[in-house]
Amino acid sequence: MRIHRMVAALMALALVLAACGGSSTSTTAGGDGSTTTAGGSTDSTAPSPGGVKEVVILASGDPPDFDPHTSGATEKSNVVHNVYDSLTMLDADQTETLPALATEWELIDDLTWEFKLREGVKFHNGEDFTAEDVKFSAERLHDPNAEVARLTSSLPDFDHAEVIDDYTVRIHTKSPDPILPQRIYGLLIVPNEYTASISESEFAMSPVGTGPYKLAEYVPGQRIVMEANDDYWGGRPKVDRLVIRPVPEPSTRVAELQTGGADIIQQAPVAQMAEIEASGNARVEVRDGRRVAFVGLDLLPGGPEALQDKRVRHALNHAVDVDLILQTINEGYGTRLATNFRPDFFGFDPNAKPFEHDPEKAKQLLAEAGYAEGLTLSFQTSDQVFPGAVEVVQALAEQLRAVGITVNVDVVDHATFRSIVIAGQEAHETEDMYAWNWGALDPDPDSPLSGTLHCEGISSYYCNPELDALIESGRREMDRTKRAEIYRQVQALLLEEAPFIFLFQIPDVYGVSNRVVFEPRLDQYILGQFLDVNE
Amino acid sequence: MRAGLVVLRRLGETLLTVFLMVTIVFFLLRVVGDPAELLVAPEATHADLDKLRAQLGLDRPLLEQYVDYMRSVVTFDFGRSLTQNRGAGELVGEAIRPTLELTGLALLIGVPVSIILGSIAALRRGGIVDTVTTAFATLGRAMPSFWLGLMLIITVAVGLRWLPASGYGTFQQLILPSVTLSMIVIADVTRLTRSSLLEAYGNDYVRTAYAKGAGPARVTWFHVFRNAMVPVITIIGLRTAVLISGSIVVESVFAVPGLGWLLIRAINRFDFPVVQATIILIGFLVIATSLLVDIAYVLIDPRSRSVRRA
């Protein structure tokens, strides 16, 4: 009898709880000075209240903090690039360098660039923007005593900054940097008085910039809300609010897009593209991204003997059919590349032709090299190196098997894979072949060359002094014509030596609500000032 | 007096278990991977990597790191997250509430549903209700929670637009993930309730009760049910432990910022302090659950009381 009543009571309780819905539980962040608005519930119904234009973006997780000078991958960039500005700005295709906080720039000498700054700009807290802020920001980026490691790779050769007057600043570099104006897009400008007056961890959670949006609310695990800056120097953005929500599961992100709970999702799974298009209220936007996929080869001493022979490497490149992979696995998206140079790179040589898919020639080359009987190679990847990596690797393995190469595919988790490849040269645990990618921020070949092909490169398993010399001289050469020639020679050398199996430029796939106007950028940043909403 | 000693002993066992757990996890994590390599930007240099390792204190001898860590844990300082710019303890503290809410609601839905279904199935054994219920429970056992969660999103959120697809903050957002999680309880407890009831019916005391003049209702609810509940409570306790740690999948699918999501992200990024802090907490929660189960025994089953005294 007692248990019976207990059970009935429990059921009644459950019913009561189910009935009283709608209570919004809002926990605020660790109160580090961030202005929090009263807990708004993130309801999934689409039209925004009272004419407020709002765009909801889904991310895969929360950023570590909002400090623009420390790393935090894509989860952070969508916040800091809306709250802060840099001296220059790149257009969506990264072909033009546009003025932002700087209005003009000029090369003074090989080691000095001078920037004239925009007048009358204020930070969100009222501080005036002057050359002092630029100097402070550049020095902060390179502060050797920083608590958290800084992103010095944004401005690698920085030596010191010189304030000429309130609106003129000179950046001095240690060695000639021909593309400093593009690179400086990565240096976000922070206000010197405010930043110096608080601790690093406080600053990391309460960003103050000159950007088109201000950080209004942050509830960890739930949402980041940014509101339009009425006094933005570029004009108040059309979209009033940007909301970023963390949703880790890609299929769930697609579901949110379909219900109208989200307006923009990044890295939509290729397999669900048709579903998104069919939903009627969303579309797919694809553009070639900044990441370039390739297969790295273990060419260090102690690596497989077969790969040391150039003919074998040529055979690998002839055996694979990259176009077929792009058509099938990538649904036709992605661009085949001859080398690891992106088309937007300075010095890209359109006359450098990719290896032709020619299995017969591959077999012939293998026979010449003494491997007519066949060859065994191991091939490693993780499922997160790039979207569809496992399928691509398996397809490549099949294509290699067709010319007599036995391929053993090994899929590991991403963290392990990264630790094997990045800085793993001494431990030398890489397999014979490994799928990899490099996403250079700047439209310049120096980054992937230095990182993956230079003897000292952090992900490089190749060492060729001739190539190193070219890479180093290209880095320093200030004359554009001479520099282009150096990189033309590099591309020719890459095709000749074939240190990789060259693949493609990885497409960025976005799911976008039909009520939002959005053009994807090469750098993958979603900038609120270029968005609009059609109600 | 005796109860007091029992509590103390249990507390001591708990602390020892958690201590061993933390030690094993600590050393295992450091053998498996290097978080600095994951934190550094791919465009960084070898020098940057070494500098980062030194900054994080990862280049010191293992034993030294261990002693330092244990010392700070005793003062409830769980260190700083390597990937989020905040304290590990703070992150874990924020994640407890969503997980407890999910687990609580899953139990609130799952326990009554399974006991009722299991009871009906036993009482109407062989009938249509019994067959359907058993089939349903078996299906629930076979279904992976990841799949069930996504199916519920597709049908209820996208198809019917009755509930939001994901997120945390409102009660509506808790419903789908709790229902998904409750299947973990329903699948097992339904069938166990049924078989436990049937088994209890076959006991001698049932005949004795009838002989003493008890009616069928009293026999069922007072005698049979109480005895049948003993193994059921055990299983509920065990499944709760699974719920707490198994919410990993459900939290990721439904974007609920609880302990499961925190743990899986920390593991993927080798965020040692957060992994350690989360495991300590999950360990305590699981042990607390088994303690509650033991207390429930004492209340429900008078035999356990007398065993203690003997």
Image (cartoon, rainbow, N blue to C red):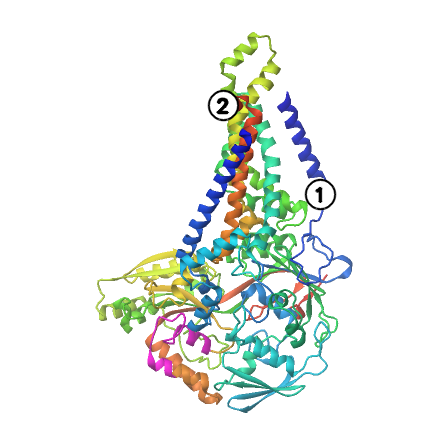
| Residue B147 seen in the current view | no
Q: Chain of mark 1?
A: A
**Of discs 2 and 1, which sits in the foreground?**
2
Residue A434 marker: none
Q: Quadrant of the C terminus of chain A?
A: bottom right
Q: Callout 1: 10 Å neighbours few (<14), some, many (20+)? A: few
Is residue A470 shown in magenta?
no
Residue at label 2?
B307
Q: Residue furthest bottom?
A: A109
Q: Position of residue A14 (x, y in %)?
A: 66, 35
**Residue type indicated by callout 1:** Gly
Q: Is residue B32 above or below residue A171?
A: above
The secondary element bearing badge 2 is classed as helix
Q: Nearer the viewer, residue A494 or A42?
A: A42
| Residue B196 seen in the current view | yes
**Marks 2 and 1, how far apart in space?**
46 Å
Q: Residue at 49%, 85% (x, y): give it.
A: A174
Quarter of the rendering containing residue A197: bottom right
**Residue type indicated by callout 2:** Val
Q: Callout 2: 10 Å neighbours few (<14), some, many (20+)? A: few
Q: Nearer the viewer, residue B148 or B272?
A: B272
The secondary element bearing badge 1 is classed as loop
Range of residues picked out in magenta: A445-469
Q: Nearer the viewer, residue A299 or B258?
A: B258
Q: Position of residue B214 (x, y in %)?
A: 60, 11
Residue at label 1?
A21
